[in-house]
Image: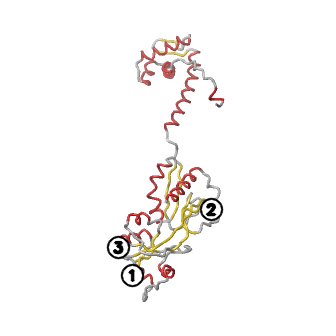
Amino acid sequence: MNEIGSSIRYPRRLPPLLSLRAFEAAAAHLSFQRAALELSVTPSAISHQVRALEDTLGQPLFRRLTRQLALTPAGQRLFDDLRMGFDVLEAGVDKLRRPAASQAVTLTTNTAFAARWVLPRMEAFRKASPGVELRLHASDTLVDLARGDADIAVRSGRGSWPGLVSRELMPERYAPLCSPMLGLKRAADLPKHQLIHCDWQPQALAPAVWPRWFREAGIAPPRGRAMKASGLSFSDETHAMLAALAGHGIALLSLTLSAEELRSGALVQPFGPALETGSYFLAVANGRENEPAIRAVWEWIASQAAAG
């Protein structure tokens, strides 16, 4: 048993709290009536409590003048000490009543990952970390974490960025996905269906585009027109997914970001291969990785990624 736990606790030798509160209010107002209004009791109750306190202490605390109260020297000393003590007590209680100030953390990531992976989990994060306000910055343009444009990022690539601490979250693969209502089963039947294209950023190391897929599948691409002219084209992956869900064709989509649609059967992967495009990484500026709020977001995202 530690020293505190084994020490003997003696009862505090204090008068009743009601009497102390009544006296402190009466001394502040120099009026039993105004003290009664403050404490929502009657003036006679205040007078009774003050008299009981004077009896306990064995000395008068007020001089009762005509229509007026005045503190005795003993009353003034007690009032000064009580006022200080009640101020400290009130401040301590207020700290418990007030929720802890939220710490804001800005998470930046690309628009598809923000919409398909982060947003569905935002409410769960708020419940898990109520003291951290998570702000989402969705952009396909990389922001400067070292400059403080955002606090933490989820990026796709190889995980090697100067000035940043990074951690791999999950590998990323893209595969042909489509609505089951197309009835597509074999890669040989691709020419019968519309291809859905999605733009990739110029800095992408291994973009999942149809020309690459045909090369890795060992299948001749559509002849005649340019590859991109042979179907629908979108600048945003989410729009490409919506087109695939509506049955407008077949798209190369992220298996990570399409996981829910694949589980529900809204989308199917009729055949392979799946294209490796790198991995998703958590990233934060050097020296900021152990800031408590940033660490809370970091650990939560890592746990969500590990859960699948």
Which residue sits at x=52%, y=61%?
108
Are there few (<14), some (14-19), or many (20+) residues within 10 Å of tag 1? few
First in sequence: mark 3 vs mark 2: 2
Q: CA distance from mark 1 to mark 3?
A: 15 Å
Determine whether 230 is above or below 105 in the image: below
Disc 1 and disc 2 in contact, CB within 8 angstroms? no
Q: Secondary structure at mark 3?
A: loop
Amino acid type indicated by mark 1: Asp
Residue 38, quarter of the rendered image? top left
How far from the left and from the top, in percent, is residue 160? 62, 67
Frontmost residue, 123 versus 193? 193
- On-image quarter of the N terminus: top right
> Which one is closest to the eye, mark 1 or mark 2?
1
Q: Position of residue 21 (x, y in %)?
A: 49, 22
Q: Nearer the viewer, residue 8 or 139?
A: 8
Residue 273, compared with residue 170, is above or below; it is below
Residue 3's quadrant in the figure?
A: top right
Q: Three-letter amino acid code at disc 2?
A: Leu
Residue situated in front as seen by the camera: 141 or 67: 141
Q: Position of residue 83 (x, y in %)?
A: 55, 25
Q: Secondary structure at mark 1?
A: helix
**C-alpha span from label 3 to label 2:** 41 Å
Which of the two discs, 3 and 2, sits closer to the camera?
A: 3
What's the residue type where badge 3 is placed?
Gly
Q: Which residue carries the number 2 mark?
A: 164
Q: Which residue is mark 1?
A: 189
Query: What whole-number distance in Å separates the C-alpha atoms at marks 1 and 2?
Result: 45 Å
Q: Quickly name the residue at label 3.
A: 247
